[in-house]
């Protein structure tokens, strides 16, 4: 920890800087204060112009929250449950699966031939066009058939001495992370069409728990792999080597030594993933319509339904915000212990 | 040391399979669809038009408008986020009084749902009943058309973006500042370098790699902006604040013009790739000098 940067400044400049930071804090805090206060207002407390201090400016009431719970403006209670269930399970699965992959990338050596990747892509594309256009399968069937064939061919091809570069662990990691660069609208829209075609085959994915969770797991994985790799790299390898001398199998090293040692990292990653899923809007907009609607969709809908009923809008926004406020408090405690430092090297 | 154990496949394949399935399916699907004239409503059987969709899009003023709007939002917002965020991080790192207290509050906005933040922003920017209007009225600027005038609306969206994402920059820059070696600064003290000289001579160059990464992440994420705009203005007034994602959503989900939307999303992908590659190419010489 170094306290440099301001050492050359005079006492007055230091005060000026403190005032600047304080001003930014006010800007950050005011909207939050505003939404909390507004959620307890009665209609007259809103329409008469801005009011700020409860009991002085206006009489607080719990009515907006009672309305919410009773489901007067959409089924908040069930939507809240949906968000919680989908968020927790997607974050848990993504953290588990992603941590495994990250560990593999840190400790084992992988070699993928560029040619094999190319074969996979060309076979998937060509197989899809062939099945769909010439053999009369519908689009979803064609995709589902082409995928395993292309994958099997690529895995076999990887064993052949193909020309072209050989990709290592760093490249695999880059492939994972680069998935985040994709504009999600590309995927969301195509996924919606694919899900509805699969739905026509008799397996409902749109507006279902499985469909939504699967999509969130896939979209959290890049960030999980990226974060967890740094945490695993920070673990001293000597412990694992000692266990290997005793012939402990790799999966027991992972579960028994590595996971407990990186518990903090796993927890932080889990929380970041949870925040991402909880706040996600675009995929939920495309992939749900009623049963598995999540909070952001319902909250966004409040706007058009109730123009100026600010007390209701604020209460709704607050329900979506509060769980994340709690998480921010937990995360900042972790941040203070220097935990997140490793994540950005 | 790298081990080689067949169990490694058990570790890595679940993640690879899920990501591969969810990313390659839509990619192939929309890539092939982008060469078709294909509508669901009214249902017309697909017809191959090759690059027809792309040609139509490139002549569409609304598409260029969406690109311009998105670029404006992304570059202005990220630029200001970086300046404010770096400043606040420097101050926090230098232990201004009360620094502990600020940290939780400063972290908060980036964890909140953009949709909820946009709703709150709508209330604050309300031209008659909002607190901002009351504040500006004191200076004689009553009833400004915050969300009903194209330029004002764009500025408001940028302001909300800055409010929400500056914390991310603060977090990353603070973590970076804490890894800087202290002895360099001690040497600079001995040379009687001023704080200003220390910043431009030491801190800024040493923070350049982290800065580049953070700005890159924010820039790419900003190009995807949708929910904030969706709630605050819905792309309006007219199409003045319509971003690329919102445009694609309107075309795809409201009109179900599949071929057109697929072509649009591919152009979007190409645009993002061009921006990313250009950015990295521009920065590379500066980054390599430091190594």
Image (cartoon, coloured by chain):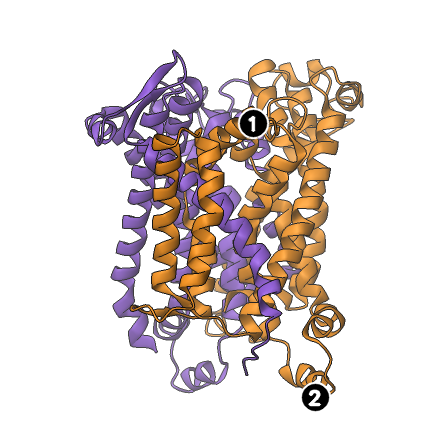
Chain colours: A orange, B purple
Residue at label 1?
A201
User: Which quadrant of the figure has residue A325?
Assistant: top right
| Residue drawn at x 35%, y 37% as measured from the top left | A129
Position of B117 relative to A11 (above/below): above
Element under disc 2: helix
Residue B238 in sight: yes
Which residue: 25% across, 69% down?
Answer: B285
Residue B109's spot in the image, x, y percent? Answer: 58, 44
Tell us which disc is closer to us: 1 or 2: 1
Which chain hosts label 1?
A: A
Q: Is residue A249 left or right of residue B138?
A: right
Image quarter of residue B237: top left
Q: Which residue occupies 47% across, 69% down?
A: A169
Residue A318: x and y in percent read 68, 32
- Mark 1 to mark 2 CA distance (whole Å): 52 Å
Residue A196 or residue A317, whichever sits in front: A196
Can residue A177 be spotted in the picture?
no
Q: Which one is in front, B132 or A259?
A: A259
CB under 8 Å between discs 1 and 2: no
Q: Nearer the viewer, residue B162 or B61?
A: B61
Residue A245, disc: 2
Q: Could you classify mark 2 by the number of other residues whose Cα lies within 10 Å: few (under 14), some (14-19), or many (20 or more)?
A: few
Q: In this view, does A210 lie above or below A60?
A: below
Tell me the SS state at disc 1: loop
């Amino acid at each position: 920890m170094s306290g440099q940067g301001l050492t050359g400044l005079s006492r007055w400049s230091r005060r000026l800087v403190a005032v600047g930071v304080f001003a930014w804090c006010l800007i950050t805090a005011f909207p939050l204060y505003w939404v909390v206060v507004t959620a307890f207002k009665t209609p007259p407390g809103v329409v008469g112009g801005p009011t700020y201090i409860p009991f002085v400016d206006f009489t607080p009431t719990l009515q907006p929250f009672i309305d919410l719970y009773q489901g007067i403006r959409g089924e908040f209670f069930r939507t809240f449950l949906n968000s919680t269930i989908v968020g927790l399970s997607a974050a848990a699965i993504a953290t588990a699966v992603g941590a495994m992959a990250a560990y593999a990338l840190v400790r084992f050596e992988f070699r993928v031939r560029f040619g094999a990747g190319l074969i996979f892509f060309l076979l998937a594309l060509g197989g899809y066009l062939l099945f769909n256009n010439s053999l009369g399968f519908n689009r979803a069937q064609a995709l589902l058939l082409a995928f395993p064939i292309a994958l099997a061919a690529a895995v076999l091809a990887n064993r052949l001495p193909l020309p072209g570069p050989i990709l290592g662990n760093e490249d695999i990691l880059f492939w994972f992370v680069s998935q985040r660069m994709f504009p999600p609208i590309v995927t969301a829209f195509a996924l919606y069409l694919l899900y509805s075609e699969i739905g026509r085959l008799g397996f409902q994915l749109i507006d279902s728990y499985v469909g939504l969770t699967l999509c969130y797991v896939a979209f959290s994985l890049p960030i999980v792999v990226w974060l967890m790799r740094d945490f695993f790299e920070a673990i001293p390898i000597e412990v694992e080597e000692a266990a290997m001398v005793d012939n402990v199998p790799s999966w027991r090293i992972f579960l028994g030594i590595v996971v407990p040692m990186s518990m903090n990292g796993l927890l932080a990653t889990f929380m970041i993933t949870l925040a991402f899923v909880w706040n996600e809007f675009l995929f939920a907009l495309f992939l749900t319509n009623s049963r598995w609607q999540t909070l952001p969709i319902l909250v966004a809908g409040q706007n058009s339904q109730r123009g100026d009923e600010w007390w209701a809008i604020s209460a709704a926004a607050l329900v979506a915000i509060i769980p994340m406020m709690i998480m921010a408090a937990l995360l900042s405690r972790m941040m203070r212990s220097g935990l997140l430092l490793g994540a950005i090297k | 040391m790298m081990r080689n154990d067949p169990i490694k496949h058990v570790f890595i394949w679940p993640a690879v399979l899920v990501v591969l399935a969810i990313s390659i399916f839509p990619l192939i699907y929309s890539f092939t669809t982008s060469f078709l004239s294909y509508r669901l409503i009214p249902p017309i059987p697909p017809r191959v038009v090759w690059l027809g969709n792309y040609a139509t899009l490139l002549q569409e003023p609304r598409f260029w408008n969406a690109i311009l709007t998105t670029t404006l939002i992304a570059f202005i917002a990220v630029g200001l986020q970086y300046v404010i965020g770096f400043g606040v991080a420097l101050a926090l790192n230098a232990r201004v009084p009360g620094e502990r207290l600020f940290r939780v509050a400063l972290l908060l906005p980036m964890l909140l749902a953009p949709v909820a933040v946009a709703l709150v922003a709508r209330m604050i920017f309300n031209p008659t009943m909002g607190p901002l209007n009351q504040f500006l009225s004191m200076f004689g600027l009553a009833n400004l058309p915050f969300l009903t005038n194209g330029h004002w609306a764009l500025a408001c969206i940028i302001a909300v973006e800055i409010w929400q994402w500056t914390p991310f920059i603060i977090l990353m820059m603070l973590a970076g500042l804490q890894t800087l070696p202290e002895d360099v600064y001690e040497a600079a003290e001995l040379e009687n370098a001023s704080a200003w000289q220390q910043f431009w001579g030491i801190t800024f160059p040493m923070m350049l790699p982290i800065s580049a990464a953070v700005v890159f992440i924010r820039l790419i994420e900003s190009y995807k902006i949708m929910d904030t705009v969706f709630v605050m203005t819905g792309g309006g007034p007219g199409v003045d604040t319509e971003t690329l994602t919102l445009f694609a959503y309107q075309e795809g989900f409201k009109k179900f013009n599949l071929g057109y939307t697929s072509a649009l999303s591919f152009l979007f992908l190409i645009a993002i790739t061009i921006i990313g590659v250009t950015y990295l190419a521009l920065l590379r010489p500066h980054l390599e000098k430091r190594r």
